[in-house]
């Protein structure tokens, strides 16, 4: 094992999903179960059921038999549908939770950008929170001190350094938190969808920081729903499906596999009223890496949704995101005056975009299904698909402009 | 793929090794079962987290309240007034020839530390649930910080105690040298109980409701308002009384400061033994169940 930075072997994580969530179990139930379960186990065993003991509670494996290796300097994308086990894997890799089987070996300091801002306290000032947050993330006080100016400069909140953070805007809070995390200097960096924070200028900074980290030869694990970002940043990706690793290899292949596979057997589905059964694109070329859109043609996006019960109001969102997560397009049925209600069973929805004025590049198409559940709007399901706008990428100004315009020039010399 | 290599079979969830060239850590995360190591070394490496969490707790508490640090004094002082009226004046409880207010307040400083510490530590894990779910650091630093933050309040209340001793003209004897010992014992009792209840509270939210009741029972079972020398009985009753860890702490604390007689040293010995075992079992229990915190909290 010369330069192996991360080694995951036979990793599994089991969760119990009984009728009662463990955290909310009260003492009476615990005592009742405490008395009941040994008796039940004994009875099951007496009846000759070898697995009788396990049948008391329903178990699900959020992750099972996952194994991969990362050499120092590798950049790995981790993709998969909702409930595939991505966040469970990341939680094990960051030592937040313990695996149920298998093991993880991590060589070198690991830093995680999971959800930034953990441990930030609104009553404390920006300065105080930098120290607090830094220490929670594993930085020594001397380290924070040394890099303090850099952190502050990166965040761009110098003026409010001594203001309690409860007076900060959401954007400022996120920027400060990200800046602390970005200066962690880990040898292994675990990232989870943090690029989509702050405004565009800040996102650019974050992406630049991320490229720096990659250039410095650090090992990066990048979990994202944004297929465009995975494709851009990671040469290699693993695809998780129902807790199992189904593919490990070039990211474009992982992504095409992700698109072609239906997410039908997503585990989180048992608790849902409605979900996206599959997406399809009748006219577009799937070309392995995503939906390819030819300029000036129309793009038909098909969505097959399935409902467990009748729902009066369902909202279908289609968003197009840039590599750094900027939302460029947002289409929703009611914006266009369409109301959607569903009956139990399958429903087909097709959105035809007659013109999509985006510059050639890779984008991320996100379908979000929102439904009214108990008087509350809840996101029931979402699916991400890479969208490739065909054509030559404009040479300059990448990440800066997205909209295609039609124009003519005239240059006349004045004499 | 599911077979585990036997090369690095370490007992704990992780092991550290230093390569000869530069400091390089190798960590292993794998399932643990049963009783696990306390990993005190790791806790020491993360001592700054404890420091910052403590510092945050103090800062936030004083920032959010109008009276701020004054509460540290008011809390025991108000109870002292009530106790002086009810137990001192009305019931005429014997106070080992010490003026009753001083007698009550001396015990109340350390009792308040204990009661607040246990309450905060017990709720700390649930309060910091969000952090536990998102970032790893030794979980034990959370209840430790809760208890440590209470030390500041104790020190403030202690200043008033010194003032009262001067007012009543009580000069401490050589016994005061043992005072740190009893403070350590109080910290151990607080942390021991806090670790037990903090871990249990994550699993069973009932614990939260049990704590005020438990503390009330313990307060009456401690020689705060009355002298332990009232228990003139010998043997079994003394041991039963000593099962309350704070009984011994208060007897010793008062003796070290005011030289009140200790008629039943067996109470003190029992309490000390209970306190130490509470801390040890509490730490191991906490460590054993902490791996599930992130999934459950």
Image (tube, coloured by chain):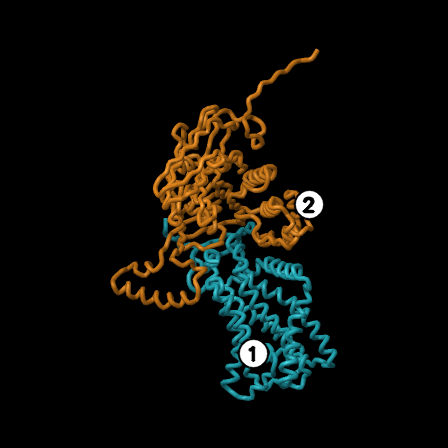
Chain colours: A orange, B cyan
The Cα atoms of the two marked residues, 1 and 2, are separated by: 54 Å
Task: Read off the residue under disc 2.
Answer: A158
Which of the pair B136/B169 is nearer the observer?
B169
The residue at 34%/66% (across/down) is A38
Q: Marks 1 and 2: CB-CB under 8 Å?
A: no
Vertical position of residue B13 compared to residue A233: above or below? below
Residue A236 visible here: no
Q: Position of residue B250 (x, y in %)?
A: 60, 78
Say which quarter of the image contains residue B191.
Answer: bottom right
The residue at 65%/59% (across/down) is B64
Chain bearing mark 1: B
Q: Position of residue B15 (x, y in %)?
A: 49, 56
Q: Residue furthest left?
A: A47
Mark 2 is surrounded, within 10 Å at the Cα level, by few (under 14), some (14 to 19) or many (20 or more) other residues, namely some
Task: Read off the residue under disc 1.
Answer: B220
Q: Residue furthest top?
A: A415
Vertical position of residue A293 compared to residue B192: above or below? above
Which of the pair A361/B16 is nearer the observer?
A361
Q: Position of residue B240 (x, y in %)?
A: 50, 81
Chain bearing mark 2: A
Q: At numbered mark 1, what does the secondary structure look like: helix, strand or loop? A: helix
Image depth: mark 1 or mark 2 in front: 1
Mark 1 is surrounded, within 10 Å at the Cα level, by few (under 14), some (14 to 19) or many (20 or more) other residues, namely few
């Amino acid at each position: 094992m010369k330069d192996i930075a991360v080694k995951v072997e036979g990793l599994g994580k089991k969760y119990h999903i009984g009728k009662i969530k463990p955290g909310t179990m009260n003492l009476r139930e615990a005592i009742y179960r405490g008395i009941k379960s040994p008796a039940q186990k004994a009875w099951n065993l007496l009846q000759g059921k070898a697995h009788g003991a396990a049948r008391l509670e329903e178990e699900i494996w959020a992750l099972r038999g996952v194994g991969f290796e990362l050499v120092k300097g590798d950049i790995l994308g981790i993709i998969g549908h909702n409930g595939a086990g991505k966040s469970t894997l990341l939680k094990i890799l960051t030592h937040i939770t313990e695996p149920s089987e298998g093991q993880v070996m991590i060589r070198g300091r690991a830093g995680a950008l999971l959800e930034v801002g953990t441990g930030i306290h609104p009553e404390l000032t920006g300065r105080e929170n930098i120290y607090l947050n830094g220490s929670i993330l594993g930085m020594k006080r001397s380290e924070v001190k040394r890099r303090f100016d850099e952190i502050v400069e990166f965040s761009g909140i110098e003026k409010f350094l001594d203001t309690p953070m409860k007076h900060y805007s959401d954007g400022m809070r996120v920027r400060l938190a990200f800046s602390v995390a970005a200066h962690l200097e880990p040898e292994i960096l675990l990232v989870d969808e943090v690029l989509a924070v702050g405004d565009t200028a800040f996102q650019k900074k974050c992406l630049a920081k991320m490229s720096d980290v990659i250039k410095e030869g650090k090992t990066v694990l990048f979990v994202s729903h944004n297929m465009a970002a995975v494709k851009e940043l990671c040469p290699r990706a693993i695809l998780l499906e129902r807790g199992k690793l189904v593919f490990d290899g070039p990211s474009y292949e992982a992504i095409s596999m992700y698109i072609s596979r239906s997410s039908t057997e997503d585990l989180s589905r048992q608790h849902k009223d409605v979900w996206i059964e599959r997406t399809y694109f009748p006219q577009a070329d799937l070309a392995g890496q995503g939906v390819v859109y030819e300029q000036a043609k129309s793009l038909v996006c098909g969505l097959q949704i399935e409902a467990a019960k009748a729902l009066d109001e369902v909202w279908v969102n289609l968003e197009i995101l840039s590599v750094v997560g900027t939302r460029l397009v947002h289409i929703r049925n009611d914006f266009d005056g369409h109301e959607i209600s569903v009956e139990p069973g399958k429903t087909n929805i097709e959105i035809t975009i007659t013109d999509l004025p985006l510059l050639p590049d890779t984008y991320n198409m996100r379908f979000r299904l929102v439904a009214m559940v108990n008087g509350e709007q809840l996101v029931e399901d979402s699916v991400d698909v890479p969208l490739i706008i065909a054509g030559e990428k404009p040479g300059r100004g990448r990440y800066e402009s997205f909209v295609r315009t039609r124009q003519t020039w005239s240059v006349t010399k004045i004499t | 793929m599911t077979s585990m290599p036997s090369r690095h079979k370490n007992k704990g969830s992780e092991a550290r090794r230093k390569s000869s060239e530069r400091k390089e850590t190798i960590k292993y995360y794998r399932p643990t079962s049963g009783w696990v190591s306390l990993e005190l070394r790791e806790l020491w490496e993360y001592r700054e987290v404890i420091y910052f969490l403590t510092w945050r707790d103090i800062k936030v508490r004083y920032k959010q309240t109008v009276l701020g640090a004054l509460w540290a004094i008011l809390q025991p002082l108000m109870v002292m007034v009530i106790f002086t009226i009810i137990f001192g004046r009305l019931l005429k409880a014997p106070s080992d020839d010490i003026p009753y207010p001083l007698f009550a307040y001396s015990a109340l400083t350390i009792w308040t530390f204990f009661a607040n510490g246990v309450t905060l530590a017990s709720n700390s894990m649930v309060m910091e649930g969000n952090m536990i779910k998102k970032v790893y650091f030794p979980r034990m630093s959370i209840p430790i910080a809760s208890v440590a933050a209470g030390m500041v309040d104790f020190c403030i209340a202690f200043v008033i105690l010194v003032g009262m001793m001067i007012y009543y003209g009580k000069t401490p004897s050589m016994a005061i040298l043992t005072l740190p010992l009893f403070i350590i014992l109080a910290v151990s009792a607080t942390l021991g109980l806090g670790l037990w209840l903090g871990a249990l509270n994550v699993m069973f939210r009932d614990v939260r409701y049990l704590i005020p009741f438990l503390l009330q029972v313990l307060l009456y079972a401690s020689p705060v308002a009355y002298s332990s020398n009232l228990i003139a009985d010998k043997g079994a009753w003394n041991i039963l009384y000593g099962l309350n860890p704070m009984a011994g702490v208060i007897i010793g604390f008062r003796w070290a400061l005011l030289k009140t007689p200790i008629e039943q040293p067996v109470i003190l010995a029992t309490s000390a033994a209970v306190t130490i075992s509470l801390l040890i079992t509490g730490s191991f229990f906490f460590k054993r169940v902490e791996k599930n915190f992130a999934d459950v909290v």
